Image: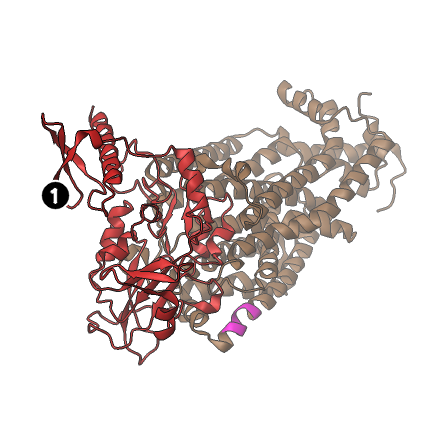
Amino acid sequence: MDKIESAAESRKLLNKITFDLTRSIVKKDELTRFWFFILIMFAGVGLWGWTIQFSTGLGVTGMRDYVSWGMYIANFVFFVAVSLIGFLISSALHLLKINWAKPVSRVAEQVAIAAVALAGVIIIMDMGRPDRFLNIFLHGRFASPIIWDVTVITTYLVISLLLFYIPLIPDLALMRDRMGKELPKWQIKLYTVLALGWKGKAEQYKIIYHTLRILMLLIIPVGLSIHTVTSWLFAATLRPGWDTSILGPYFVAGAFVAGTAAVIVVMYIYRLRYNLKDYFQDLHFNYMGKLLVFVCLVYLYFNINEYLVPGYKMKLADGIHLTELFKGNHSGMFWIVQLTGLLLPIVLLLFPYFRKPLPIAIISLIVMISAWFKRYLIVIPTLEHPFLPVQNVPVNFQNYSPTSTEIMITIFSFVAAFLIISVLAKLFPVIAIWEYAEDQGIDKKYLTENLKN
Amino acid sequence: MERNTRRNFMKKLGASMGVAGVLGSSGLFSSCAKVETNTSGKITLLTSDGELVEVEKALLKPADIPSLPENQKRGRLGLSGRSWVMVIDLSKCRNARECMKACQNHHQLRPEQHHINVLQMQDAEHTAPYYMPKPCQQCDNPPCTKVCPVNATFKRDDGIVLIDNERCIGCRFCIAACPYSARVFNWFEPRDAEKYEGVTYNIEANVPQKKGTISKCLFSADRLRDSKLPSCVSACPNGVYWFGDRNEDAVTNGTTKETVSFSELIEKNAAYTLMEELGTKPRVYYLPPKDRAFPFQGQNNTHHS
């Protein structure tokens, strides 16, 4: 973008950008209150379900000795998958100097933070003895992939928080100094503390750029690790359907699909709700649509490998697993998921019409739901068919079906994730104001002149 | 009040176990309950076999029940110099399920929880079906202990894979990792939980069981410490089980009490291990179900995958 020379024009544009991007923070209406009320209520119901589970035992779920991992673990994998988008958009695309992705990166980080934080909560909710959680640190055995997962997920959460927070500092200072009249005192105080005395000096910007670059590089191995290690929780076992060396990249590819779709949905909601048509433009949806097609194609490639190769050989155990998926109990879900989660976006998004905001948001929502069920199909069918016969146990040991308590707790995780995203959107601008202004050709000095020095 | 009585009962039980130790008898007094004390300095005790016996009061001494940390410590070390193995003769199994019952009583298991499970097997479409008792294989390359994040399940020097349910966090990764479906989980309060309240945890029997933790076959490690055969082995009426020490190259039949050479037994009868292609190196050997002593009476509803 060309530099805007006139000072008056710069100031005017900056004011407009600031006004538009802080609207979500200033706006107080019934709908927002209602939204938070609904979220908190559902979260409360979910937590209540968890206390029931804690006092009665994990037996309140549909899990039993054979299918000993169920919906919670499928949900955990889904959340880890979605969180990976933070790495793709705010690091990989940034480092490749793909400029259109810049305004999307804060949305991507919001989604990443909410998803990875909830992934951690879900795993605690799946434990038989959550009260012994600290044993992981007291008696941790580094040979267990669970310890690797705990390590990389916490690291990823920390880096994601930093990637969200550091580019936020100039904006925090801006709000600290400009919005005293519109916002309650505690909020301004919060901004003051978080802004760390930002003055908008050139050296300060330099520190930000430098730190961000390091973080973007750091998050690449960590991001790849979180989902690869999560896949190893399965691949490290001897079970048909899991016992495959392709599982790491297969999971990573699937994660990009789920995450891209999630970001598109959130982008669409912000665009609509906060009136950000000029910021999340048709162009962004167009590019995100192309990105979704690309990651879907990669995922399709891995799917073909994952099913065609063992399906060609039909070794006894693999054969039973695949038959179950292709034409057995789970075949309905399997084919719908492959169709709506993979083929549909690839085909439809090739047409420019479907890359317009509304159609692509609907497609992305369908892709996300399919992605969730895909995780379900990765976890459950394998456990329903162990090597040795399932005998001398009640019928509900043989086939898994989730109970209402289990569903309640799973809904909690979604509600809690929405809650985190909503709080972040309510407290901080959803696009970096300073970065956006700079891209519009506004000189940094206009950002600085508003600050109280 | 009620709980107090139970505590007292357990104390008496402990005291009587001491008697058993003193008398050095072979399991007759393994767990006796005191019935009455008479004036002549003798005490009447009820053995687990339901017999009344009289014992000199002077011979009574408190049982040697170690504290929890001590129990956990010695439970992790195992019996030094031993290398336990089990041989299961499939030609002898008639699905009596006495092993399963004895095991569930010993380890406080619910009816649907199996440390040992007698399965109806059929290897291929036209091959003969047979019964296969399946305990934990006590693998020498155990996939389950590898994945445990907190070292709650571990392999001892004498070959047994144990679980410390005072440490287990209930992640169930070991269940996913075990290809033999040998592990069970306490989805609810364990069976008869109130009876076991206040009893010190014995890692070598995994009793009392704990809600939210894993349990598994451990070759009745507590009985091995008392020089007794595992519960399932002793309970079998059909001579299916041989149990012993590979270092001594001797295994004893639980039914006939006959002791033979382990290496000879497995060599002569073409013993095999279960799914050896997985590289888990089981310690449980199977003798093939040829010339079966009993006809197969189950349905061929085997579900082999």
Q: Nearer the viewer, residue B115 or B229?
A: B229
* Residue indicated by mark 1: B51
User: Which colour is chain A painted?
Assistant: brown
Query: Could you tell me which chain the residue with mark 1 belongs to?
Result: B
Q: Quadrant of the C terminus of chain A?
A: top right
**In the rendered image, which quarter is residue A191 located in?**
top right
Q: Nearer the viewer, residue A390 or A198?
A: A390
Q: Is the residue marked by circle 1 packed among few (<14), some (14-19), or many (20+) residues within 10 Å?
A: few
Q: In the image, what residue occupies the spot 62% across and 38% down?
A: A274
Q: In the image, what residue occupies the spot 41% across and 66% down?
A: A331
**In the rendered image, which quarter is residue A440 located in?**
top right
Tell me, by letter, which chain the rendering colours red.
B
Q: Is residue B89 visible?
A: yes
- Characterize the magenta stretch by its predominant secondary structure: helix
User: Image height check: is A256 above or below A32?
Assistant: below
Question: Which contiguous range is marked in magenta?
Answer: A305-310
Q: Position of residue B233 (x, y in %)?
A: 27, 57
**Residue at the outermost top position:** A185
Q: Position of residue B82 (x, y in %)?
A: 42, 53
Residue kind at label 1, given as amino acid type: Glu
Q: In the image, what residue occupies the spot 30% across and 55% down?
A: A396
**In the rendered image, which quarter is residue B16 located in?**
top left
**Is B202 included in the stretch rendered in magenta?**
no
